[in-house]
Image: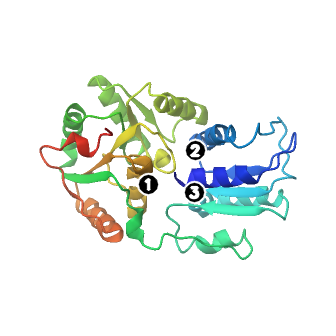
Amino acid sequence: MGKTAVFVLSSLQQIDPVAGQVAALVLCHTRELAYQICHEYERFSKYLILALARDKDLSLKNVRHFILDECDKMLESLDMRRDVQEIFKMTPHDKQVMMFSATLSKEIRPVCKKFMQDPMEIYVDDEAKLTLHGLVQHYIKLSEAEKNRKLNDLLDALDFNQVVIFVKSVSRAAELNKLLCECNFPSICIHSGMTQEERLTRYKNFKEGHKRILVATDLVGRGIDIERVNIVINYDMPDSADTYLHRVGRAGRFGTKGLAITFVSSASDSDVLNQVQERFEVDIKELPEQIDTSTYMPS
């Protein structure tokens, strides 16, 4: 069910709620992800305990579970790491510490261990297993100038519930979103240039299905779970194999069907695509003229 469900369920099963006290603390790197995790706690808690204690004052003296989601992103930035350390020191010494990430570099692993004592480490033993079952992956070779026309053609031709289109910068996200709306593809845009409140409002709008097309930067490339998304389009190639995995993981969630299409317009784009195929042992073929809808649309 995903790593969010792992730590939500495991912590809820162990919580002995005390009125007015916080028993589990989850830190993550974006407000959108925090909103989603909060929703998961509310959803699962209905079946595990009568209610979670709620109080306007945040007291950490009874915290028993300290959880970092996307821990590599939380700890790779020195500023964010400093905040995590400060919060960590406010919690009791006797607590369970859990850290989760789909991609954890060798450089960050020692940093994670500084928050733990004799931790149990669980890794996917073969990185090829990280690729998503049920996800169809293709690429399209084209020039930069051809991207907009090809994107319009794809949105016209493909069947989809919801689609996420990833770009490499804030300015490109805003420009592409404007272009799509002008071409009668009502889309919504999320990027780091917006206030947190605006981003969260737009995220809710898309998650609730009011819009079917989302244009985004890598801000929403990690951890965000929107069940109806079944197509991801990399309008701009991600900068690494890790980022590619996080992006395409927005489609084909929980083993469902999905489609990922990546635009390749430069030699560096081809290099990243080759890295993806080698690392995850996946054969990504060029998009055919006709694609069977049943291969990527849930039945």
What sort of colour scheme is used for the picture? rainbow
Q: Amino acid at mark 3?
A: Glu
Could you tell which of marks 2 and 3 lies nearer the N-terminus? 2
Q: Quadrant of residue 38?
A: top right
Tell me whether the residue at label 1 lies in contact with that at label 3, contact meaning CB atoms closer than 8 angstroms.
no
Could you tell which of marks 1 and 3 lies nearer the N-terminus? 3
Q: Quadrant of residue 232?
A: top left
How many labels sit on residues?
3
Residue at label 2?
Answer: 33
Q: Nearer the viewer, residue 212 or 152?
A: 212
Element type at mark 1: helix
Residue at label 1?
Answer: 246
Tell me whether the residue at label 2 lies in contact with that at label 3, contact meaning CB atoms closer than 8 angstroms.
yes
Side of 194 relative to 136 (left or right): right
What is the CA distance from the residue labelled 1 to the residue labelled 2?
A: 14 Å
What is the CA distance from the residue labelled 1 to the residue labelled 3?
A: 11 Å
Quadrant housing the C terminus: top left
Q: Nearer the viewer, residue 206 or 48?
A: 48
Element type at mark 3: loop
Residue at label 3?
Answer: 70
Q: Give the residue drawn at x 59%, y 63%.
A: 76
Q: Give the residue drawn at x 26%, y 25%.
A: 183
Side of 79 relative to 239 (left or right): right
Q: Give the residue drawn at x 83%, y 43%.
A: 58
Res. 264 in view: no
Q: Amino acid at mark 2?
A: Leu
